[in-house]
Amino acid sequence: MRKAERLNEIVHYLRRMHRATTARVLADTFEVSERTIYRDIQDLMDTGIPITGEAGVGYLIDKTYHLPPIMFDADEIEAIALGIGMVSNWTDDTFAEKAKSAYRKIQATLTAPMLHELTQISTFSAPSHYKIPWEVNFTEVRECIRQKQFVSFCYIDLKERITKRTIRPLALISFSPVWLLTGWCEKRANFRNFRLDRISQFSAEGKRFRDEKGKTLADYLALTENDQ
């Protein structure tokens, strides 16, 4: 990675962090020495970018700082376009429109050469008859995850048994063509994955939950990583 690219990525990285980030962490992330990070941070500060902190303590950036327009290369543009297509074909109309709206905003920031690259894209996601329909509202499920709301529903397992479940919804995961709702199941007192196409009578309970140790998405992901 060229220095100019690294400096830009460091700014993006610091903007995503909510706590001070040490030079050691930055060095590991960008695969350079801590000494290089010290120089990079100083270079950024010398150009007026509002970074505070010091070596050995960590660095923070003023979140009100506005980055210059984002620049993409041809492969990044193609990856974004492909992602938009996949969202459009494999979610619901509401989320698909949000994806298209985001893409239009990205297009508005592109230079003429990058707009030309859009006409050269050769990777696409096409509608598929393998998509498995579901009766739940995909957007409502996403909102319940975002708002940390308990949800309840009836679930038909692979043996056609129907059970009533109340869960803490944590994530929607695509294993094309199947979508899974991952959550902490109150009935089983454990993490469970539920196929969207086997869920009926989905409803928000009107009660929010707080993250508890052992019941969060981070805990679930840690378990899946250990199983691999």
Image (cartoon, helix red, strand yellow):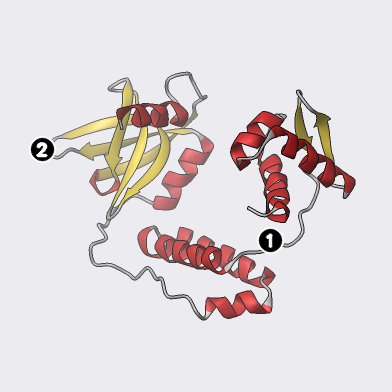
Residue at 59%, 66% (x, y): give it.
73
Is the residue 176 above or below the residue 142 in the image? below
Q: Which residue is mark 1?
A: 70
**Secondary structure beneath label 2:** loop
Residues at discs 1 and 2 in contact (Cβ within 8 Å) = no
Amino acid carrying mark 1 in the image = Ile
Instruction: Name the residue at the left extreme.
Output: 159
Relative image position of residue 141 (x, y in whole percent)? 42, 45
Q: Which residue is mark 2?
A: 159
Relative image position of residue 109 (x, y in whole percent)? 68, 69
Relative image position of residue 124 (x, y in whole percent)? 39, 71
- Residue 27: image tag: none
Using the numbered discs, state the Cα–Cα distance from disc 1 to disc 2 in whole angstroms: 50 Å
Q: Earlier in the sequence, mark 1 or mark 2?
A: 1
Is the residue 87 above or below the residue 187 in the image? below
Q: Nearer the viewer, residue 64 or 117?
A: 117
